[in-house]
Image (spheres, rainbow, N blue to C red):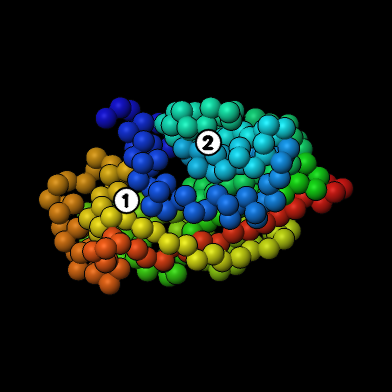
Amino acid sequence: MTTPDEMGLTPEAACGYESYFVPAIFAQWPPIMAEAAGVSPGDNVLDVGCGTGIFTREALRLVGTEGTVTGADLSESMLTVARDTCAAAEFRQCSVMSLPFDEGQFDAVVSSFMLMFVPEPATGLKEMARVLRPGGRMAISVWEGLNSNDVYSALVDIVSDVVSEEAGESIAWPFTLGAEGKLAELFAQAGLSVSSVSVHAGLALFPSVSEFVKTEIESWLLADSVSESQMAEIVAQADSEFLQYYDASKGMEFPFNAAVASYTKPSGA
């Protein structure tokens, strides 16, 4: 594999993310995020933490020829894939902690499942609000905590047992901001008054338990760090643990819940 980028991801991992995670998990969320941010024809939209362009593609469809969509991400590997899939959008490699955009530049700012990877999430929220025009809308999504996502909670335990506590923590990382009230708390820390926080019941669908486990490990932060014997043991434990979620005709399907916060920038701000 090639050298990891700023996020610890390789181009191969980014391609795996687009090929496996997007259809299995993320494809259902762009319409929900677009509605939460009120994305409309003619809007100038910023997609922060755009990844491979999952939401960017939906935003381009909604804003039409009179609007613009800009994707921003710290991972150059993710942006390489995004540029290939969203030729009509502009992409910038940057951190949410210091966005290279003018104050009030965008009508809508959306960040899907990114904030939990930011070292100072309240600062990131404040920076996203800065580039939002007065009256503009922002939508942020995070996965609910592990106590509301049983399958991933069990996978964390299995990986911690078979590989290491550190490996388990990498699986748990995306769920760190999902506790009830945490998003509203972060908005308050940023000096922002959140308009609403709602819980959405999503679904994850994988061809099999084995494919779920391998996708989580080989297409994300643990890529190339788990041995074949460890993978076999993880799959064996998962097959037993997740039997209730598997159906031969559908594959492995399980609830995967998220929280979505909406914010409207005051007209006088």
* Residue holding disc 2: 73
Percent x, y for residue 45?
Answer: 67, 39
Q: Mark 2 and mark 1 in contact (Cβ < 8 Å)?
A: no
Task: Tell me what residue is drawn at x 68 percent, y 63 percent.
Answer: 196
Q: Residue at x 44, y 34 (%)?
A: 78
Q: Tell me if 136 is positioned left or right of 160 in this view.
A: right
Residue 104 at x, y percent in the picture: 77, 38
Q: Is residue 106 visible?
A: no
**In the image, is 90 to the left or to the right of 220?**
right
Q: Quadrant of residue 81?
A: top left
Amino acid type, label 1: Glu
In the displayed structure, would residue 1 be above or below residue 200?
A: above
- For image coordinates 76% across by 46% down, the residue present is 136
Q: Mark 1 points at which residue?
A: 216
Mark 1 Cα shell of 10 Å, populated few (<14), some (14-19), many (≥20): some
Q: Which residue is drawn at 68% across and 46% down?
A: 39
For the question of whether residue 105 can be seen, the reply is yes
Viewer-closest of 262 and 84: 84
> In the rendering, at what x and y percent does residue 89 appear?
59, 30
Q: Quadrant of residue 261?
A: bottom right
Label tally: 2
Q: Residue furthest right?
A: 268
**Residue 116 location (% of width, % of height):** 50, 52
**The N terminus sits in image quarter:** top left
Mark 2 lies on a secondary structure that is strand
How many other residues sit within 10 Å of disc 2, few (<14), some (14-19) or many (≥20)? many
Q: Which of 113 and 84 is in front in this view?
A: 84
Q: Reading the chain from its start, which is encountered first: label 1 or label 2?
A: 2
Q: What residue type is labelled 2?
A: Asp
